[in-house]
C-alpha cells in the first residue's frame, strides 16, 4: 500500500472550487494529504469512486471520540471548523447511536411524506414570486436573498413548527461557523456564534414544550421527555440545529447554483421547455456539476484501513471532496460543463451510506418546484452581472449573491 503525499495540499476557503478541484484531480492520486484552515491536517478522497468508498466505509466513523488529536487537546477549542465536526447529534454519531437518532426523525422525511408537501411548497413558491413580481423589476434583484433563501426556510419552519424568524436570527451565527475568517484573525466570534446558536435553540425547545403542536419538534421533545435514556438534551439541541440550519443552507445553495448554471447556458432551459428534460433532471445535474457541499467533514479510521490504495492509520481524519467527485473526468465526460444531455448524472452531493442526507428528497423537491415556478413566471430571467462572489468556506461552496433581472435586459 502507498502512503499519501507527505506535504499537505493547503485547502483555501477563498479558492475557486472548480479550479481547486481541477488541480487536485489532475495529480492523478485518489487520496491526498491536505491542510485545513488552522493547520489541522486530514486525508482527502478526491475522485468519485474513492469519495464514495470513504462515505460508506464500515471502519470510518463520524464520532470525533475516535480522533486522538481532538482528545489530546491538539485541536484548539476555537478552531474555526470545530463546531462542524463535533457535537451530540446524529451528524457526529456512529453505529447504533446514529441509527437511534436518525430513526427519531426519519418518518417526517420519507418520500411519501415529502411528496405530500408538494402542493404547499408550490403555494409558497408562487407567493414569493408574486411578491417579486409586484416589486420594481427593472433593477437587479438578489435571487438568493429574495427567493432561494425564503422558500426552504418557510418549509422547514413549518415542518418543525417554529417561527421562520428563528432561522433568520440563527443565520448570521451559522454563517460564522461555515465561513472561517482568514488565518490570524480573531476567532472569538466562532465561540460566540456557538453560544448564540445554543441559546436560540434552547429557547425554541422551551417554547415548543410550552406550546406543543402537530410538528416534528414536538415529537422530538416528547421522545426526550418520555425516556431520559433515549434522547439527551444535547442530542435534542444538535438535532434541531441539523434540521433547522445545516440542511437549509445547502438547499439555498443548490437553487442558486443551478439557476446560475441555467442562465449561463439558455439552451439548457430551452431543453426543459421543449420537454426533452425535466426539472428533476436539472436538479440532478446541478447537484453533480456544482455540489453545495465542497468537502464532507470529518470521518475517523477506527482501525488501520486502506482507501484508494493508500494506508490510513487508526484515528486519522478523512474528508471527502464532493465537489471534486462531481467533476471526476473518469466518470463524466466534459465534467466541467453543465449538460442535461449527458448519459449519467450520478453524484455524491447528498453523501452515501448510513449518513446519506436525511432531507435529500425534500431538498430535491424544493429545488424542482423553485426552478419550475421561477422560469415559468420569468421566462426572460437574465444575469444582471458576471461579477459574482462565492462564499468563503471549506464545507460549502456557492454564490454569496445572485443579482438577476427578472424581465431580462432591455435594449
Image (cartoon, grey):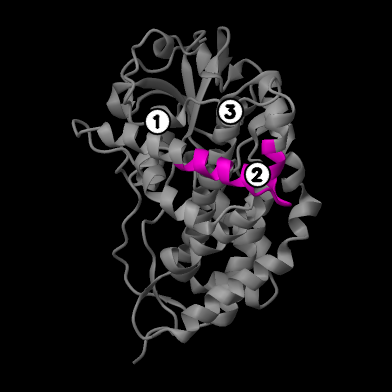
Find the residue positioned furthest to the front.
Answer: 210
Whole-Å distance between the Cαs marked 2 and 1?
47 Å
Q: Which residues are magenta?
A: 200-221
**x, y percentage for residue 383?**
39, 73
211 in magenta: yes
Taking the spot 49% from the left edge, 10% from the top edge, the residue there is 315
Mark 1 lies on residue: 27
Task: Tell me which numbered mark, 1 or 3, is placed earlier along the sequence.
Answer: 1
Helix, strand or loop under label 1: loop
- Residue 119 at least partly seen: yes
The quarter of the picture where residue 70 lies is top left
26 in magenta: no
Task: Tell me which numbered mark, 2 or 3, is placed earlier along the sequence.
Answer: 2
Find the residue positioned furthest to the right.
Answer: 112
Mark 3 lies on residue: 233
Q: Residues within 10 Å of mark 3 (few under 14, many from 20)?
A: some
Q: Are marks 1 and 3 in contact (CB under 8 Å)?
A: no
**x, y percentage for residue 235?**
59, 28
Whole-Å distance between the Cαs marked 2 and 3?
13 Å
Taking the spot 57% from the left edge, 81% from the top edge, the residue there is 377
Mark 2 lies on residue: 217
371 to 315, vertically: above or below: below
Helix, strand or loop under label 3: helix
195 to 232, vertically: above or below: below
Q: Which mark is drawn over residue 89?
A: none
Whole-Å distance between the Cαs marked 1 and 3?
46 Å
**x, y percentage for residue 365?**
67, 59
Q: Are marks 2 and 3 in contact (CB under 8 Å)?
A: no
Left or right relative to 398: residue 118: right
Q: Residues within 10 Å of mark 2 (few under 14, many from 20)?
A: many
- Residue 30 at least partly seen: no
Amino acid at each position: 500500500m502507498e502512503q499519501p503525499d507527505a506535504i499537505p495540499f493547503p485547502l483555501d476557503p477563498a479558492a475557486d472550487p472548480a479550479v481547486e478541484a481541477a488541480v487536485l484531480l489532475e495529480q492523478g492520486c485518489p487520496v491526498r494529504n491536505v491542510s485545513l484552515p488552522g493547520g489541522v491536517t486530514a486525508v482527502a478522497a478526491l475522485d468519485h469512486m474513492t469519495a464514495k468508498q470513504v462515505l460508506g466505509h464500515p471502519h470510518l466513523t463520524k464520532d470525533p471520540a475516535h480522533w486522538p488529536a481532538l482528545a489530546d487537546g491538539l485541536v484548539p477549542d476555537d478552531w474555526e471548523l470545530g463546531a462542524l465536526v463535533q457535537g451530540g447529534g446524529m451528524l457526529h454519531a456512529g453505529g447504533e447511536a446514529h441509527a437511534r437518532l436518525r430513526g427519531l426523525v426519519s418518518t417526517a422525511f420519507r418520500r411519501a411524506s415529502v411528496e405530500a408537501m408538494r402542493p404547499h411548497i408550490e403555494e409558497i413558491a408562487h407567493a414569493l414570486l408574486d411578491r417579486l413580481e409586484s416589486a420594481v423589476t427593472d433593477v437587479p434583484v438578489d435571487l438568493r436573498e429574495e427567493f432561494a433563501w425564503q422558500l426552504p426556510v418557510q418549509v422547514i419552519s413549518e415542518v418543525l413548527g417554529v417561527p421562520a424568524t428563528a432561522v433568520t436570527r440563527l443565520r448570521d451565527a451559522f454563517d460564522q461557523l461555515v465561513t472561517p475568517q482568514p488565518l490570524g484573525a480573531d476567532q472569538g466570534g466562532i465561540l460566540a456564534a456557538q453560544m448564540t446558536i445554543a441559546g436560540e435553540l434552547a429557547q425554541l425547545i422551551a417554547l415548543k414544550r410550552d406550546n406543543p403542536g402537530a410538528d416534528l419538534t414536538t415529537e422530538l421533545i416528547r421522545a426526550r421527555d418520555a425516556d431520559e435514556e433515549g434522547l439527551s438534551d444535547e442530542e435534542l439541541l444538535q438535532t434541531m440545529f441539523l434540521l433547522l440550519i445545516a440542511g437549509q443552507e445547502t438547499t439555498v445553495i443548490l437553487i442558486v447554483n443551478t439557476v446560475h448554471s441555467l442562465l449561463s447556458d439558455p439552451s439548457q432551459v430551452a431543453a426543459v421547455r421543449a420537454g426533452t428534460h425535466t426539472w428533476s433532471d436539472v436538479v440532478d445535474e446541478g447537484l453533480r456539476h456544482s455540489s453545495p457541499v465542497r468537502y464532507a467533514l470529518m470521518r475517523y479510521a477506527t482501525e488501520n484501513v486502506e482507501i484508494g490504495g493508500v494506508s490510513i492509520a487508526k484515528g486519522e481524519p478523512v474528508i471527502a471532496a464532493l465537489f471534486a467527485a462531481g467533476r471526476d473526468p473518469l466518470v463524466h465526460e466534459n465534467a466541467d460543463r453543465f449538460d442535461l444531455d449527458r448519459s449519467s448524472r450520478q453524484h455524491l452531493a447528498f453523501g452515501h451510506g448510513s449518513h446519506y442526507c436525511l432531507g435529500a428528497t425534500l431538498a430535491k423537491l424544493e429545488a424542482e418546484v423553485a426552478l419550475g415556478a421561477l422560469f415559468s413566471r420569468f421566462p426572460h430571467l437574465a444575469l444582471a452581472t458576471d461579477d459574482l462572489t462565492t462564499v468563503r468556506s471549506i464545507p460549502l461552496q456557492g454564490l454569496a449573491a445572485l443579482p438577476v433581472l427578472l424581465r431580462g435586459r432591455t435594449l
